Image (cartoon, rainbow, N blue to C red):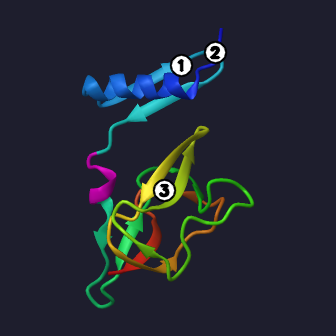
């Protein structure tokens, strides 16, 4: 059996998306892939924090391992004080060796970094706080 390439995975996910499948489990002798369509796109998961501080929370769109940089030894995507746009990548979350980009979802300045690279995060965990 040959290994799946990143292109194969993208094609599988494209087909799943086009079919409007809500859940998929693909099991082979070497690995298992589980996919569950989220209830909302990543951009809409950015929630406004408590009115008292006016900051915007960037939350984890999935369960996985949080990384601030593309690879060990590379510069983080953002630091406290970095200016971001809604589509600015702020980190990646790894799930079963598949890396998913997380975007800011809001315009502003990174006010707080709430996780450390390598942390396991749960869906909805606050990763960053943005001052609009």
Disc 3 from disc 2: Cα separation: 28 Å
100 horizontally vs 2: left or right: left
User: Of the numbered discs in the image, which one, if any, rests on residue 29?
Assistant: 2
Q: Is residue 53 magenta?
A: no
Q: Nearer the viewer, residue 81 or 3?
A: 81
The magenta-colored residue range is: 39-44
In this view, 38 is above or below 31: below
Residue at x 31%, y 59% (from the top left corner):
45
Residue at x 47%, y 31% (from the top left corner):
34
Q: Earlier in the sequence, mark 3 or mark 2?
A: 2
Residue 36 spot, x, y in % from top left:
37, 36
Residue at x 30%, y 69% (from the top left corner):
47
Disc 1 from disc 3: Cα separation: 24 Å
Numbered circles on residues, count: 3
User: Of the numbered discs in the image, which one, if any, rests on residue 95?
Assistant: none
| Residue at mark 1 | 27
């Amino acid at each position: 059996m040959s290994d799946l390439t990143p292109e194969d995975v993208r094609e599988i996910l494209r087909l799943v998306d086009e079919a409007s499948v809500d859940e998929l489990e693909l099991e082979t002798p070497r690995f298992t892939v589980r996919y569950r369509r989220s209830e909302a796109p990543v951009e809409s998961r950015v929630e406004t924090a408590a009115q008292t501080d006016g900051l915007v929370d960037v939350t984890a769109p999935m369960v996985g391992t949080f990384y601030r940089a593309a690879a060990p030894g590379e510069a983080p995507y953002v630091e406290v004080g970095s200016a971001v746009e809604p589509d600015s990548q702020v980190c990646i979350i790894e799930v079963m060796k598949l890396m998913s980009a997380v975007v800011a979802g809001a315009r502003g300045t990174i006010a707080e970094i709430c996780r450390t690279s390598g942390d396991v995060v749960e869906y909805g965990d606050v990763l960053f706080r943005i001052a609009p």
